[in-house]
Image (cartoon, rainbow, N blue to C red):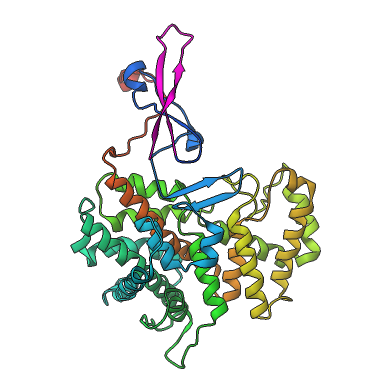
Amino acid sequence: MMTPSNVKATLSFSDGSPAMELPLYKGSIGPDVIDIRKLYAQTGKFTYDPGFLSTASCNSTITYIDGDKGELLYRGYPIEQLAVHCDFLDTCYLLLYGDLPNAQQQKEFHKLVTNHTMVNEQMQFFLRGFRRDAHPMAVMTGLVGALSAFYHDSTDINNPTHREIAAIRLIAKMPTLVAMAYKYGVGQPYMYPQNNLSYSANFMRMMFATPCEPYEPNDVLVRAIDRIFILHADHEQNASTSTVRLCGSSGTNPFAAIAAGVACLWGPAHGGANEAALNMLEDIQRAGGVEKIGEFIRQVKDKNSNVKLMGFGHRVYKNYDPRAKLMRETCHEVLTALGLGNDPLFKLAMALEKIALEDEYFVARKLYPNVDFYSGIVQRAIGIPVSLFTAIFALARTVGWIAQLNEMIGDPEYKIGRPRQLYAGAPRRDVQPIAQRA
Protein backbone atom coordinates (compact mmCIF):
# COMPACT_ATOMS: atom_id res chain seq x y z
CA MET A 1 0.00 0.00 0.00
CA MET A 2 1.21 3.49 -0.83
CA THR A 3 1.77 5.72 2.20
CA PRO A 4 1.65 9.52 1.80
CA SER A 5 4.96 11.15 2.70
CA ASN A 6 5.34 14.33 4.72
CA VAL A 7 7.85 15.45 2.11
CA LYS A 8 6.59 17.19 -1.03
CA ALA A 9 8.36 17.64 -4.36
CA THR A 10 8.35 21.18 -5.74
CA LEU A 11 8.44 21.52 -9.51
CA SER A 12 9.56 24.90 -10.78
CA PHE A 13 9.86 26.26 -14.33
CA SER A 14 12.29 28.77 -15.82
CA ASP A 15 9.70 29.96 -18.35
CA GLY A 16 7.72 31.86 -15.73
CA SER A 17 5.04 29.18 -15.21
CA PRO A 18 3.97 28.93 -11.57
CA ALA A 19 5.67 26.24 -9.48
CA MET A 20 3.59 23.38 -8.17
CA GLU A 21 3.88 20.91 -5.32
CA LEU A 22 3.70 17.22 -6.07
CA PRO A 23 2.80 14.59 -3.43
CA LEU A 24 5.35 11.88 -2.58
CA TYR A 25 4.33 8.34 -1.70
CA LYS A 26 6.33 5.63 0.03
CA GLY A 27 5.98 1.94 -0.75
CA SER A 28 6.71 -0.80 1.79
CA ILE A 29 10.20 -1.06 0.20
CA GLY A 30 11.82 0.55 -2.81
CA PRO A 31 12.07 4.10 -4.16
CA ASP A 32 9.57 6.82 -3.26
CA VAL A 33 7.30 7.90 -6.12
CA ILE A 34 6.26 11.39 -7.16
CA ASP A 35 2.55 11.63 -7.96
CA ILE A 36 2.26 13.53 -11.24
CA ARG A 37 -1.40 12.78 -11.98
CA LYS A 38 -2.41 16.47 -11.75
CA LEU A 39 0.62 17.75 -13.66
CA TYR A 40 -1.12 18.20 -17.01
CA ALA A 41 -4.28 19.68 -15.53
CA GLN A 42 -2.32 22.30 -13.57
CA THR A 43 0.56 23.06 -15.97
CA GLY A 44 -0.50 21.84 -19.42
CA LYS A 45 2.74 19.79 -19.53
CA PHE A 46 3.47 16.06 -19.78
CA THR A 47 6.48 14.13 -18.57
CA TYR A 48 8.71 12.42 -21.15
CA ASP A 49 10.10 8.99 -20.26
CA PRO A 50 10.73 6.68 -23.26
CA GLY A 51 10.90 3.07 -22.15
CA PHE A 52 9.43 4.07 -18.75
CA LEU A 53 12.87 4.11 -17.15
CA SER A 54 11.72 6.33 -14.26
CA THR A 55 7.96 5.86 -14.28
CA ALA A 56 5.87 3.73 -11.90
CA SER A 57 2.87 2.76 -13.99
CA CYS A 58 0.85 1.26 -11.15
CA ASN A 59 0.60 0.47 -7.44
CA SER A 60 1.30 -3.25 -6.94
CA THR A 61 1.73 -5.72 -4.06
CA ILE A 62 2.85 -8.70 -6.13
CA THR A 63 6.53 -8.60 -7.08
CA TYR A 64 9.46 -6.45 -5.99
CA ILE A 65 12.84 -6.17 -7.70
CA ASP A 66 15.94 -4.37 -6.42
CA GLY A 67 18.26 -4.42 -9.39
CA ASP A 68 21.25 -3.04 -7.47
CA LYS A 69 21.01 -5.69 -4.75
CA GLY A 70 20.07 -8.48 -7.14
CA GLU A 71 16.87 -9.13 -5.19
CA LEU A 72 13.58 -10.61 -6.42
CA LEU A 73 10.61 -11.06 -4.08
CA TYR A 74 7.22 -12.66 -4.79
CA ARG A 75 4.75 -11.25 -2.24
CA GLY A 76 7.75 -10.54 0.00
CA TYR A 77 9.32 -14.02 -0.25
CA PRO A 78 12.87 -14.19 -1.74
CA ILE A 79 13.02 -16.15 -4.96
CA GLU A 80 15.94 -18.17 -3.52
CA GLN A 81 13.65 -19.58 -0.80
CA LEU A 82 10.65 -20.22 -3.05
CA ALA A 83 12.76 -22.08 -5.62
CA VAL A 84 14.11 -24.42 -2.93
CA HIS A 85 11.13 -24.93 -0.62
CA CYS A 86 8.05 -24.63 -2.89
CA ASP A 87 6.76 -26.11 -6.11
CA PHE A 88 5.27 -24.15 -9.00
CA LEU A 89 1.63 -24.54 -7.96
CA ASP A 90 2.46 -23.27 -4.46
CA THR A 91 4.05 -20.27 -6.17
CA CYS A 92 0.91 -19.82 -8.30
CA TYR A 93 -1.24 -19.82 -5.16
CA LEU A 94 1.06 -17.24 -3.58
CA LEU A 95 0.94 -14.90 -6.58
CA LEU A 96 -2.83 -15.21 -6.97
CA TYR A 97 -3.91 -14.97 -3.32
CA GLY A 98 -1.06 -13.21 -1.52
CA ASP A 99 0.14 -15.96 0.86
CA LEU A 100 1.59 -19.45 0.61
CA PRO A 101 -1.03 -22.16 1.04
CA ASN A 102 -1.43 -24.22 4.19
CA ALA A 103 -1.72 -28.00 3.82
CA GLN A 104 -5.48 -27.97 3.15
CA GLN A 105 -5.31 -25.05 0.72
CA GLN A 106 -2.42 -26.70 -1.08
CA LYS A 107 -4.35 -29.94 -1.51
CA GLU A 108 -7.49 -28.18 -2.76
CA PHE A 109 -5.63 -25.86 -5.14
CA HIS A 110 -3.52 -28.65 -6.65
CA LYS A 111 -6.68 -30.72 -7.18
CA LEU A 112 -8.55 -27.77 -8.72
CA VAL A 113 -5.80 -27.07 -11.25
CA THR A 114 -5.30 -30.76 -12.03
CA ASN A 115 -9.01 -31.20 -12.77
CA HIS A 116 -8.92 -28.49 -15.44
CA THR A 117 -5.88 -29.54 -17.47
CA MET A 118 -7.83 -30.95 -20.41
CA VAL A 119 -8.83 -28.63 -23.26
CA ASN A 120 -11.88 -28.76 -25.48
CA GLU A 121 -11.44 -31.51 -28.07
CA GLN A 122 -12.14 -29.03 -30.87
CA MET A 123 -8.83 -27.32 -30.10
CA GLN A 124 -7.21 -30.20 -32.00
CA PHE A 125 -9.07 -29.18 -35.15
CA PHE A 126 -8.18 -25.53 -34.59
CA LEU A 127 -4.51 -26.55 -34.50
CA ARG A 128 -4.78 -28.17 -37.90
CA GLY A 129 -5.23 -24.73 -39.46
CA PHE A 130 -1.58 -23.95 -38.76
CA ARG A 131 1.32 -25.07 -40.92
CA ARG A 132 3.32 -27.86 -39.32
CA ASP A 133 6.46 -25.71 -39.41
CA ALA A 134 4.82 -22.65 -37.80
CA HIS A 135 6.75 -21.11 -34.90
CA PRO A 136 5.24 -22.40 -31.61
CA MET A 137 4.70 -18.82 -30.40
CA ALA A 138 2.60 -18.07 -33.49
CA VAL A 139 0.53 -21.12 -32.61
CA MET A 140 0.33 -20.22 -28.90
CA THR A 141 -0.85 -16.67 -29.62
CA GLY A 142 -3.74 -18.13 -31.60
CA LEU A 143 -4.55 -20.93 -29.16
CA VAL A 144 -4.65 -18.73 -26.05
CA GLY A 145 -6.77 -16.10 -27.77
CA ALA A 146 -9.12 -18.84 -28.98
CA LEU A 147 -9.79 -20.02 -25.41
CA SER A 148 -12.35 -17.23 -25.08
CA ALA A 149 -14.35 -18.90 -27.87
CA PHE A 150 -14.35 -22.24 -26.04
CA TYR A 151 -14.79 -20.96 -22.48
CA HIS A 152 -17.05 -17.94 -22.95
CA ASP A 153 -18.72 -18.51 -19.57
CA SER A 154 -15.73 -16.85 -17.86
CA THR A 155 -14.92 -13.84 -20.03
CA ASP A 156 -16.35 -10.97 -17.96
CA ILE A 157 -13.23 -9.29 -16.64
CA ASN A 158 -15.26 -7.22 -14.16
CA ASN A 159 -16.74 -10.30 -12.50
CA PRO A 160 -14.38 -11.62 -9.75
CA THR A 161 -15.79 -15.14 -10.08
CA HIS A 162 -15.20 -15.14 -13.83
CA ARG A 163 -11.66 -13.88 -13.31
CA GLU A 164 -10.90 -16.68 -10.83
CA ILE A 165 -12.36 -19.36 -13.12
CA ALA A 166 -10.36 -17.98 -16.06
CA ALA A 167 -7.21 -17.91 -13.91
CA ILE A 168 -7.51 -21.60 -12.98
CA ARG A 169 -8.31 -22.54 -16.55
CA LEU A 170 -5.34 -20.68 -17.96
CA ILE A 171 -2.84 -22.03 -15.41
CA ALA A 172 -4.18 -25.57 -15.89
CA LYS A 173 -4.44 -25.58 -19.67
CA MET A 174 -1.25 -23.77 -20.70
CA PRO A 175 0.96 -26.91 -20.30
CA THR A 176 -1.55 -28.87 -22.36
CA LEU A 177 -1.56 -26.24 -25.12
CA VAL A 178 2.24 -25.96 -25.23
CA ALA A 179 2.58 -29.75 -25.43
CA MET A 180 -0.08 -29.89 -28.15
CA ALA A 181 1.74 -27.22 -30.17
CA TYR A 182 4.95 -29.27 -29.86
CA LYS A 183 3.33 -32.58 -30.77
CA TYR A 184 1.58 -31.00 -33.75
CA GLY A 185 4.87 -29.63 -35.05
CA VAL A 186 6.65 -33.00 -34.86
CA GLY A 187 3.67 -35.01 -36.11
CA GLN A 188 3.17 -37.10 -32.97
CA PRO A 189 -0.15 -37.97 -31.29
CA TYR A 190 -1.33 -35.64 -28.53
CA MET A 191 -0.99 -37.05 -25.03
CA TYR A 192 -3.86 -36.34 -22.67
CA PRO A 193 -3.12 -35.06 -19.14
CA GLN A 194 -2.76 -37.62 -16.40
CA ASN A 195 -4.24 -36.50 -13.08
CA ASN A 196 -2.05 -38.62 -10.81
CA LEU A 197 1.07 -36.67 -11.81
CA SER A 198 2.33 -33.35 -10.52
CA TYR A 199 1.92 -30.22 -12.66
CA SER A 200 5.48 -30.36 -14.01
CA ALA A 201 5.64 -34.16 -14.36
CA ASN A 202 2.37 -34.05 -16.26
CA PHE A 203 3.82 -31.46 -18.64
CA MET A 204 6.90 -33.59 -19.23
CA ARG A 205 4.74 -36.61 -19.99
CA MET A 206 2.50 -34.68 -22.42
CA MET A 207 5.66 -33.44 -24.16
CA PHE A 208 7.72 -36.59 -24.42
CA ALA A 209 5.48 -39.66 -23.98
CA THR A 210 4.01 -41.59 -26.90
CA PRO A 211 1.25 -44.23 -26.98
CA CYS A 212 3.90 -46.84 -27.86
CA GLU A 213 5.29 -47.36 -24.36
CA PRO A 214 4.93 -46.29 -20.74
CA TYR A 215 6.60 -43.02 -19.75
CA GLU A 216 8.38 -42.56 -16.41
CA PRO A 217 9.17 -38.91 -15.65
CA ASN A 218 12.78 -38.33 -14.57
CA ASP A 219 12.67 -36.67 -11.13
CA VAL A 220 15.75 -34.51 -11.81
CA LEU A 221 14.26 -33.19 -15.05
CA VAL A 222 10.86 -32.63 -13.46
CA ARG A 223 12.48 -30.58 -10.68
CA ALA A 224 14.40 -28.64 -13.30
CA ILE A 225 11.32 -27.70 -15.34
CA ASP A 226 9.44 -26.86 -12.13
CA ARG A 227 12.27 -24.49 -11.13
CA ILE A 228 12.19 -22.86 -14.56
CA PHE A 229 8.46 -22.26 -14.06
CA ILE A 230 9.01 -20.74 -10.59
CA LEU A 231 11.83 -18.44 -11.69
CA HIS A 232 9.80 -17.09 -14.60
CA ALA A 233 6.40 -16.83 -12.87
CA ASP A 234 6.48 -13.04 -12.51
CA HIS A 235 8.93 -10.18 -12.92
CA GLU A 236 7.22 -6.94 -11.97
CA GLN A 237 6.16 -4.47 -14.70
CA ASN A 238 8.10 -5.88 -17.65
CA ALA A 239 7.02 -5.40 -21.27
CA SER A 240 4.61 -8.35 -21.49
CA THR A 241 3.07 -7.70 -18.06
CA SER A 242 2.57 -4.05 -18.94
CA THR A 243 0.99 -5.21 -22.20
CA VAL A 244 -1.44 -7.47 -20.32
CA ARG A 245 -2.35 -4.62 -17.96
CA LEU A 246 -2.80 -2.13 -20.80
CA CYS A 247 -4.82 -4.59 -22.88
CA GLY A 248 -6.94 -5.61 -19.89
CA SER A 249 -7.59 -1.98 -18.94
CA SER A 250 -9.94 -1.75 -21.93
CA GLY A 251 -12.20 -4.37 -20.32
CA THR A 252 -11.36 -7.12 -22.79
CA ASN A 253 -11.67 -10.74 -21.64
CA PRO A 254 -8.83 -12.40 -19.66
CA PHE A 255 -7.95 -14.82 -22.46
CA ALA A 256 -7.45 -11.97 -24.96
CA ALA A 257 -5.33 -10.02 -22.45
CA ILE A 258 -3.10 -13.04 -21.80
CA ALA A 259 -2.81 -13.68 -25.56
CA ALA A 260 -1.50 -10.11 -25.89
CA GLY A 261 1.12 -10.96 -23.26
CA VAL A 262 2.12 -14.08 -25.20
CA ALA A 263 2.56 -11.99 -28.36
CA CYS A 264 4.73 -9.43 -26.55
CA LEU A 265 6.84 -12.12 -24.88
CA TRP A 266 7.76 -13.49 -28.31
CA GLY A 267 10.20 -10.61 -28.89
CA PRO A 268 13.93 -11.52 -28.78
CA ALA A 269 14.61 -8.70 -26.30
CA HIS A 270 12.11 -10.24 -23.85
CA GLY A 271 10.99 -13.88 -23.69
CA GLY A 272 12.93 -14.83 -26.79
CA ALA A 273 16.25 -14.11 -25.06
CA ASN A 274 16.95 -17.74 -24.10
CA GLU A 275 16.19 -18.85 -27.66
CA ALA A 276 18.58 -16.17 -28.93
CA ALA A 277 21.27 -17.32 -26.45
CA LEU A 278 21.06 -20.95 -27.63
CA ASN A 279 21.11 -19.87 -31.28
CA MET A 280 24.27 -17.86 -30.51
CA LEU A 281 25.94 -20.93 -29.00
CA GLU A 282 24.98 -23.07 -31.97
CA ASP A 283 26.38 -20.42 -34.35
CA ILE A 284 29.72 -20.49 -32.49
CA GLN A 285 29.67 -24.30 -32.53
CA ARG A 286 29.13 -24.36 -36.29
CA ALA A 287 31.97 -21.85 -36.74
CA GLY A 288 34.43 -24.12 -34.94
CA GLY A 289 33.38 -24.49 -31.30
CA VAL A 290 35.52 -23.69 -28.26
CA GLU A 291 38.53 -22.81 -30.45
CA LYS A 292 36.52 -19.95 -31.99
CA ILE A 293 35.41 -18.33 -28.73
CA GLY A 294 38.35 -15.89 -28.80
CA GLU A 295 37.34 -14.68 -32.27
CA PHE A 296 33.71 -14.40 -31.18
CA ILE A 297 34.65 -12.37 -28.08
CA ARG A 298 36.79 -10.07 -30.23
CA GLN A 299 33.79 -9.40 -32.48
CA VAL A 300 31.54 -8.75 -29.48
CA LYS A 301 33.98 -6.09 -28.23
CA ASP A 302 34.26 -4.48 -31.69
CA LYS A 303 31.94 -1.47 -31.82
CA ASN A 304 31.69 -1.79 -35.58
CA SER A 305 30.55 -5.41 -35.38
CA ASN A 306 26.92 -6.50 -35.25
CA VAL A 307 27.80 -9.57 -33.14
CA LYS A 308 26.03 -9.55 -29.77
CA LEU A 309 26.59 -11.55 -26.59
CA MET A 310 23.15 -13.01 -25.83
CA GLY A 311 22.14 -14.34 -22.40
CA PHE A 312 24.46 -11.98 -20.52
CA GLY A 313 23.54 -8.86 -18.54
CA HIS A 314 20.06 -7.62 -17.67
CA ARG A 315 18.29 -4.29 -17.94
CA VAL A 316 17.00 -4.43 -14.37
CA TYR A 317 19.71 -6.32 -12.47
CA LYS A 318 22.86 -4.19 -12.25
CA ASN A 319 25.09 -6.64 -10.36
CA TYR A 320 23.67 -10.12 -10.83
CA ASP A 321 20.41 -11.87 -11.63
CA PRO A 322 19.35 -13.84 -8.51
CA ARG A 323 17.54 -16.33 -10.74
CA ALA A 324 20.77 -17.09 -12.63
CA LYS A 325 22.51 -18.62 -9.60
CA LEU A 326 19.56 -20.95 -9.02
CA MET A 327 19.33 -21.85 -12.69
CA ARG A 328 23.09 -22.49 -12.82
CA GLU A 329 22.72 -25.07 -10.01
CA THR A 330 19.88 -26.73 -11.90
CA CYS A 331 21.92 -26.65 -15.10
CA HIS A 332 24.76 -28.66 -13.57
CA GLU A 333 22.32 -31.11 -11.90
CA VAL A 334 20.65 -31.81 -15.24
CA LEU A 335 23.90 -32.15 -17.19
CA THR A 336 25.25 -34.56 -14.56
CA ALA A 337 22.05 -36.63 -14.46
CA LEU A 338 21.99 -36.95 -18.26
CA GLY A 339 25.73 -37.54 -18.63
CA LEU A 340 26.13 -34.49 -20.84
CA GLY A 341 29.17 -32.97 -19.15
CA ASN A 342 31.24 -33.61 -22.30
CA ASP A 343 28.62 -32.53 -24.83
CA PRO A 344 30.39 -30.07 -27.19
CA LEU A 345 27.70 -27.39 -26.96
CA PHE A 346 27.59 -27.52 -23.18
CA LYS A 347 31.39 -27.39 -22.95
CA LEU A 348 31.25 -24.37 -25.22
CA ALA A 349 28.65 -22.73 -22.97
CA MET A 350 30.75 -23.29 -19.85
CA ALA A 351 33.85 -21.92 -21.60
CA LEU A 352 31.95 -18.81 -22.65
CA GLU A 353 30.62 -18.41 -19.11
CA LYS A 354 34.16 -18.59 -17.69
CA ILE A 355 35.48 -15.92 -20.07
CA ALA A 356 32.56 -13.57 -19.44
CA LEU A 357 32.99 -13.87 -15.66
CA GLU A 358 36.75 -13.21 -15.79
CA ASP A 359 37.27 -10.83 -18.73
CA GLU A 360 37.58 -7.24 -17.48
CA TYR A 361 35.60 -5.96 -20.48
CA PHE A 362 32.50 -7.92 -19.42
CA VAL A 363 33.09 -7.55 -15.67
CA ALA A 364 33.28 -3.75 -15.95
CA ARG A 365 30.04 -3.70 -17.94
CA LYS A 366 28.39 -6.19 -15.58
CA LEU A 367 27.63 -8.57 -18.44
CA TYR A 368 27.22 -11.64 -16.23
CA PRO A 369 25.27 -14.74 -17.34
CA ASN A 370 21.56 -14.24 -16.71
CA VAL A 371 18.74 -16.71 -16.19
CA ASP A 372 18.11 -17.00 -19.94
CA PHE A 373 21.63 -18.31 -20.58
CA TYR A 374 21.24 -21.22 -18.17
CA SER A 375 17.57 -21.98 -18.76
CA GLY A 376 18.23 -22.37 -22.47
CA ILE A 377 20.99 -24.89 -21.76
CA VAL A 378 18.73 -26.81 -19.35
CA GLN A 379 15.81 -26.94 -21.76
CA ARG A 380 17.99 -28.15 -24.62
CA ALA A 381 19.41 -30.88 -22.37
CA ILE A 382 15.90 -31.97 -21.41
CA GLY A 383 15.03 -32.30 -25.09
CA ILE A 384 12.93 -29.19 -25.61
CA PRO A 385 13.57 -27.69 -29.07
CA VAL A 386 14.94 -24.15 -29.15
CA SER A 387 11.85 -22.85 -30.95
CA LEU A 388 9.70 -23.90 -27.98
CA PHE A 389 11.72 -22.05 -25.30
CA THR A 390 9.58 -18.91 -25.38
CA ALA A 391 6.38 -20.95 -25.19
CA ILE A 392 7.72 -22.53 -21.97
CA PHE A 393 8.37 -19.01 -20.68
CA ALA A 394 4.79 -18.00 -21.56
CA LEU A 395 3.46 -21.05 -19.72
CA ALA A 396 5.37 -20.02 -16.58
CA ARG A 397 4.55 -16.30 -16.82
CA THR A 398 0.80 -16.85 -17.28
CA VAL A 399 0.15 -16.87 -13.52
CA GLY A 400 2.04 -13.59 -13.10
CA TRP A 401 0.05 -11.98 -15.89
CA ILE A 402 -3.21 -13.15 -14.33
CA ALA A 403 -2.24 -11.93 -10.85
CA GLN A 404 -1.25 -8.53 -12.26
CA LEU A 405 -4.43 -8.29 -14.34
CA ASN A 406 -6.66 -9.18 -11.37
CA GLU A 407 -4.86 -6.67 -9.17
CA MET A 408 -5.40 -3.91 -11.72
CA ILE A 409 -9.10 -4.67 -12.20
CA GLY A 410 -9.60 -4.72 -8.42
CA ASP A 411 -7.90 -1.32 -7.97
CA PRO A 412 -10.56 1.38 -7.44
CA GLU A 413 -8.24 3.92 -9.06
CA TYR A 414 -7.70 1.96 -12.27
CA LYS A 415 -8.54 3.59 -15.60
CA ILE A 416 -8.06 2.55 -19.19
CA GLY A 417 -4.39 3.05 -20.08
CA ARG A 418 -3.83 6.08 -22.27
CA PRO A 419 -0.16 7.20 -22.55
CA ARG A 420 0.51 10.64 -23.97
CA GLN A 421 3.27 11.73 -26.34
CA LEU A 422 5.72 14.44 -27.31
CA TYR A 423 4.51 15.34 -30.81
CA ALA A 424 7.35 16.33 -33.11
CA GLY A 425 5.60 16.21 -36.48
CA ALA A 426 4.40 18.94 -38.82
CA PRO A 427 2.42 21.82 -37.25
CA ARG A 428 -1.14 22.51 -38.41
CA ARG A 429 -1.28 23.17 -42.15
CA ASP A 430 -3.90 23.42 -44.86
CA VAL A 431 -4.40 21.12 -47.84
CA GLN A 432 -3.37 22.87 -51.06
CA PRO A 433 -4.77 22.18 -54.54
CA ILE A 434 -2.61 19.56 -56.29
CA ALA A 435 -1.27 22.11 -58.80
CA GLN A 436 0.18 24.22 -55.96
CA ARG A 437 1.93 21.38 -54.13
CA ALA A 438 5.70 21.26 -54.36
Which range of residues does the magenta coloring cover? 1-27
Residue sitting at x 57%, y 78%: 220
Residue 97 is left or right of residue 63, and the answer is left
Nearest the eye: 281 or 76:
76
Asked if residue 411 lies in the magenta stretch, the reply is no
Q: Residue furthest left?
A: 153
The C terminus - image quarter: top left
The residue located at (54%, 61%) in the rendering is 81
| Quadrant of the snapshot with the N terminus | top left
Instruction: Tell me where residue 396 sits by quadrant.
Output: bottom left
Task: Note whether residue 438 is visible.
Answer: no
Does residue 104 lie above or below 82 as drawn?
below
Q: Position of residue 129 (x, y in %)?
A: 33, 70
Q: Decide whether residue 3 is among the magenta residues.
A: yes
In the image, residue 121 lies at what x, y percent?
Answer: 27, 77
* Residue 250 vertical placement versus 347 (above, below): above
